[in-house]
Every structure is written in C-alpha cells, then in structure tokens.
Image (cartoon, helix red, strand yellow):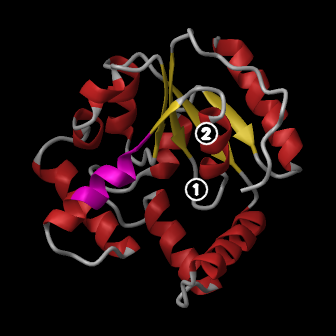
Amino acid sequence: MKKLPQNARNYSGNHLVLGLVGPIASGKGTISEFLKSKGFKYFSLSNVVRAETLVRGLEMTRENLQDVGNDLRENFSGSVLVDRIAKEIKRHKLVIIDGVRNPQEIAAIKNELGGKIVHISAFKNRRLERYLERAKVRGEDDATTSKFKQVEARDLGVGEGENGQQVSECLRLADFKLVNNSSLDQFYLDCEKMLSEYL
C-alpha cells in the first residue's frame, strides 16, 4: 500500500456510514485504507461470506464465495450480509462497508443505517492491470485476462438473479462517484472533497 497523506484531516466525532461499490480492481481497497487512516471503522460484507464459507467447509475461491453469498441472500434475505453485522456497525460513528454487490444491501445501508453509497470507478484497462499485478503479489497463478473478464462479468450481474451479484445495478444507486484513473494523490484529494460534502 502506498503512503497515505500526512496532512489528512481526521473526522473523529462526526457520524457517517459509507457503503463502497465498484467493479473489480477499481480501488475499493485503496479508499478503505485512506478512510481507515481518518478514523473510519472497516467492515467487509465479503468477510461475512468468508466466515460462512469456512463454516460450510468450502475452499476460499472467488467462485465459492460468490455462490455462498448468493445462497445466503436467496435463503435468508437480500440484506442478510448487512443484517449480520448491523448491530456492530451501529456501535461506531464513522464506518466503511466494503463489498456491496446487491441493491438489497444498499437499501439496508441507506434505510437501516442511514448510510451513503460511493461508486468507485476506473477504466477497464487500468483495472485489468491492477488485477494482474495484485494477483502476482498474492501468488495467484490462475489470474489471466480471460479470467478477469469472466469474474468481472459475473460480479457486474451477467447471468445473475435478483439475489446474486448485481454491481452494475448498485452503481446506479450510488450517492457519490469517485473516479480512480489518475494519480493516487488526486484520488485522495477527490476522497477529501467527497467527505467535505457529508461531514
């Protein structure tokens, strides 16, 4: 992770819940680290799915995680991932919720938690570069351009039902859009501008 700005303003004492949504490798992790440095508590819906996947004794592959997330929404409610951590979220004033992939999760974040949704955007070729670079660091041997396209398509909602991955639909429900195509410094500046609108 690159160095965070030294002069970043801290927002402790304020109240804001931000749900993050964006296509794969758009920069959700980057903004999460930035917001954590400013006093935000981090929550991940993907971690809720990972916990369930572990309970089920399944391998931690992206496909299995997507399947388990879909199954939970299908058999409980579309907002089940948010519901499972809502009580803990309410204990904190500044919150990031990463891994939002379904409109029903957005409804819960907005209606139950009073949150805002942030759309993280980046050009596809930039995201592919980041995906491949990240996979190399993680030692993921199966990361290819073809795999990226396959993973992205399902994540965006291709072939998915209403309880499945629906990132494309989620993007349309966002309250704010951050574009992550230029420098990291510019991305941080844009994040600051966003926060100034809400805090």
Can you say whether 100 is above or below 177 in the image? below
Res. 23 mark: 1
Q: Main secondary structure of the magenta part?
A: helix
| Left or right of 85 on screen, residue 168 | right
Image coordinates for residue 150, horizontal then vertical, percent: 50, 77
* Magenta-colored stretch includes residue 50: yes
Q: Position of residue 16 (x, y in %)?
A: 52, 17
Q: Amino acid at mark 2?
A: His
Image quadrant assignment for residue 4:
top right
Residue 161 in view (yes/no) = no
Report which quarter residue 128 is drawn in: bottom right
Residue drawn 25% across the image and 57% down it: 51
Q: Quadrant of the N terminus?
A: bottom right
User: Which label sits on residue 119?
Assistant: 2
In the rendered view, tell whether residue 99 sits above or below residue 140: above
Which residue is the extreme one toward the front? 6
The part of the chain drawn in magenta is: 43-51
Q: Is residue 33 magenta?
A: no
Q: Secondary structure at mark 2?
A: strand
